[in-house]
Amino acid sequence: MGILLRLLAGLVVLLSLLLAGPLWMLATEEVTTGRHWATAGREPAGLAPTPAEAPEAVVQLYAARTWGWRGAFGVHTWIATREAEAEQWRLHQVMGWRRPARVSETTAAPDRAWFGSPPVLLADYRGAAAEEVIPAIEAAVAAYPAPAVYRAWPGPNSNTFTAWVVREVPGFEAVLPVTAVGKDYLLDGPLAPAPGGRGMTLSLGGMLGLTLGLDEGVELNLLGLALGVDLRRPALKLPGVERLGVPPPVKGAGGPPRPVD
């Protein structure tokens, strides 16, 4: 009986740790839950440069809170590329209500709010660095192993797709937040490079895993939700809340600094 009680107490503590952040986000109304998705804002955030502002090639990676109560747990991520002198962007993402789930399209505004949630920049590559990775990004998008599959939890989902492309393209790195649920759902075995480029991720079906990296710090994945600590840029990373402390750098550093959450 004593062992059973200790196991039960440990389970309660674990669930409290994993759910405290999302419950806080809901209680403080940090996520939008009271509107219909069709009326939610889709305005550009001003993070994507115009050809006049940046005529060179540009690659950007965005994240924004998902729609409704799911936004208390995680973000949606997507990749945008623009060739030098081009007027339009190529936008790549995975969406649960589309079949196939992987969608690549042309747009003039890749930084639009995700149904009421403004995006933040996770990576911003420009000039020669962007020109070098754009063809590889297009090839990786086309080769994504699960283009018709979408599972919000534990994956594969939009964050699984983004993390897979980042891992496949040398020179294209990004520190995905712990709120990118599904980023640790690996499609090519239980071990893969960390998206930040200087570490490794071990994951068992996206339900249990560990990431060690110079950019990610230490992240523990439990039941698809991640928590961790970053010692280089002191911060505590919690499910739902994302990060308490110094914000991570925008990889590539080609554009304006990322807003502090």
Image: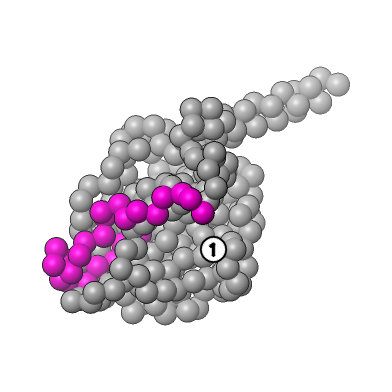
Q: Which residue is mark 1?
A: 95
Question: Percent from the top left, x then y, of residue 120?
Answer: 34, 49
Quadrant holding the N terminus: top right
**Pick the front one: 42 or 178:** 42
Q: Which residue appears farthest toward the front when viewing the image? A: 39
Q: Residue at x 18, y 69 (%)?
A: 51
Q: Is residue 55 magenta?
A: yes
Q: Is residue 63 visible?
A: no
Q: Is residue 159 visible?
A: yes
Q: Residue at x 42, y 33 (%)?
A: 236
Q: Residue at x 20, y 65 (%)?
A: 50
Q: Which residue appears farthest toward the top when viewing the image? A: 2
Element assignment for label 1: loop
Question: Percent from the top left, x then y, of residue 151?
Answer: 63, 59
Question: Percent from the top left, x then y, of residue 101?
Answer: 57, 69
Over which residues does the magenta segment extend?
38-61
**Pick the front one: 52 or 240:** 52
SS majority, magenta = loop
Left or right of residue 38: residue 151: right
Left or right of residue 164: residue 82: left
**In the picture, residue 108 is in which quadrant?**
bottom left
Quadrant holding the C terminus: top left
Which residue type carries mark 1?
Met
Left or right of residue 144: residue 204: right
Q: Is residue 133 magenta?
A: no
Colour scheme of the picture: one colour
Q: Residue at x 64, y 44 (%)?
A: 223
